[in-house]
Image (cartoon, rainbow, N blue to C red):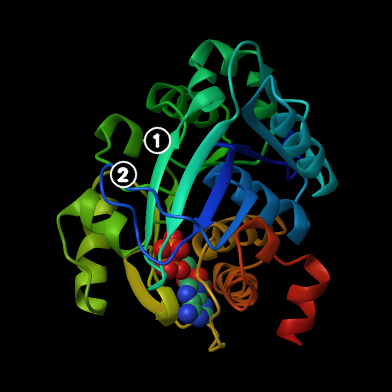
Amino acid sequence: MKTGKLVVLGSINADHILNLTHFPQPGETVIGKQYQVAFGGKGANQAVAAGRSGANIAFIAGVGEDDIGARIREQLSRDQIDVSAVETVADETTGVALIFVNGDAENMIGINAGANAAITPDVLARHRQKIIDASALLMQLESPLETVIAAAQLAHQHQTRVILNPAPACDLPDELLALVDMITPNETEAQRLTGVTVQNEQDAARAAQLLHNKGITTVLITLGSRGVWLSENGQGQRIPGFQVQAVDTIAAGDTFNGALVTALLEHQPMQTAVKFAHAAAAIAVTRAGAQSSVPWRNEIDAFLH
Ligand code: ADP
């Protein structure tokens, strides 16, 4: 019997963010202006968005055997997430993103997958009951692809809805796409998967059709401040987002995904669920940072009223 639970399978990273006037050239040292460590990773961001927006959520992920991993695990727990399947991986470091941000707000990012790469299909198998019991499984592409495929297969066999946020942009086997019930690419990711450059609604409709042809029932292409293109049952439409004063759009898509799935698990109709997710993401873009910008349920409800 399905109980409305959500499982997120994905990445955890510690983001080390250094603001500097200009990027260093090879061999150059540049003194930074500001440095901070923030908790990130697309999986963790989406899990936090789901937890804060009210989902009954368990997270399958990995942290290293280090102080930051322990701190991140505690924080995820405070964000209303069941962390019993967040593994502490022996002899590994927590995933890191090393981010330089220059004076023009451009960034350069290097990532070490660390413990994220250790979440193999064998590790996943230890947590299979969580996927079997859940109503929905939400994944991104910062975990090993074979683990994403194994999780999709298991979910599909047990009538757990498979939702894939195909980020970061990456080529995907048809074998995986055929197991996906709902996909939520942004414009760049939609282009990577379909070859269609998404610049207007016609392009979005064409890209969505190509994804339907792979066996995916619901396609939602996020269009930044213009909202989303929703395509299901042969019908496509744009659902606009909310106009807000954006501070930074970091984790906008992650907040959207976490909140959307929460609303769908509450049996909200698709259009209402998309509006709920737009509200959550709109709040997030008015605030700086990734997980620090993700709103709680009472804030989303207040925004919508
Ligand atoms: P990603 O962050 O994955 O690139 P998008 O940029 O498409 O994803 O944004 C995802 C969602 O975040 C949008 O559908 C919308 O709800 C919200 N959003 C993004 N940018 C803005 C903005 N400038 N103003 C309001 N909402 C935004």
**Residue 215 placed where, x, y %?**
31, 44
Query: On the rendered structure, is 106 left or right of 80?
Result: left
For label 2, being within 8 Å of ligand 1 is answered: no
Q: Are marks 1 and 2 in contact (CB under 8 Å)?
A: yes
Any part of residue 164 in sight? no
Q: Residue at 72% x, 67% y: name it.
A: 295
Question: If the image is split into quadrants, where does the N terminus sit?
Answer: top right
> Image height check: is 68 above or below 296?
above
Q: Amino acid at mark 2?
A: Gly
Q: Which mark is residue 215?
A: 2
| Quadrant in which residue 69 is drawn | top right
Q: Earlier in the sequence, mark 1 or mark 2?
A: 1
**Residue 234 placed where, x, y %?**
32, 65
| Quadrant in which residue 74 is drawn | top right
**Residue 91 placed where, x, y %?**
61, 11
Q: Which mark is residue 292?
A: none
Any part of residue 17 in sight? yes
Q: Residue at 60% x, 59% y: name it.
A: 290
Q: Amino acid at mark 1?
A: Leu
Query: On the rendered structure, is 142 left or right of 61?
Result: left
Query: On the rendered structure, is 103 left or right of 163?
Result: left
Q: Residue at 53% x, 89% y: name it.
A: 243
SS at mark 2 in the image: loop
Question: If the image is split into quadrants, where does the C terminus sit?
Answer: bottom right
Q: Residues within 10 Å of mark 1 (few under 14, many from 20)?
A: many
Q: Residue at 77% x, 77% y: name it.
A: 301
SS at mark 1 in the image: loop
> Image height check: is 102 above or below 271?
above
Closer to the camera in the image, 237 or 39? 39
**Residue 247 placed where, x, y %?**
55, 78
Q: Residues within 10 Å of mark 2 (few under 14, many from 20)?
A: some
| Residue underneath mark 1 | 179
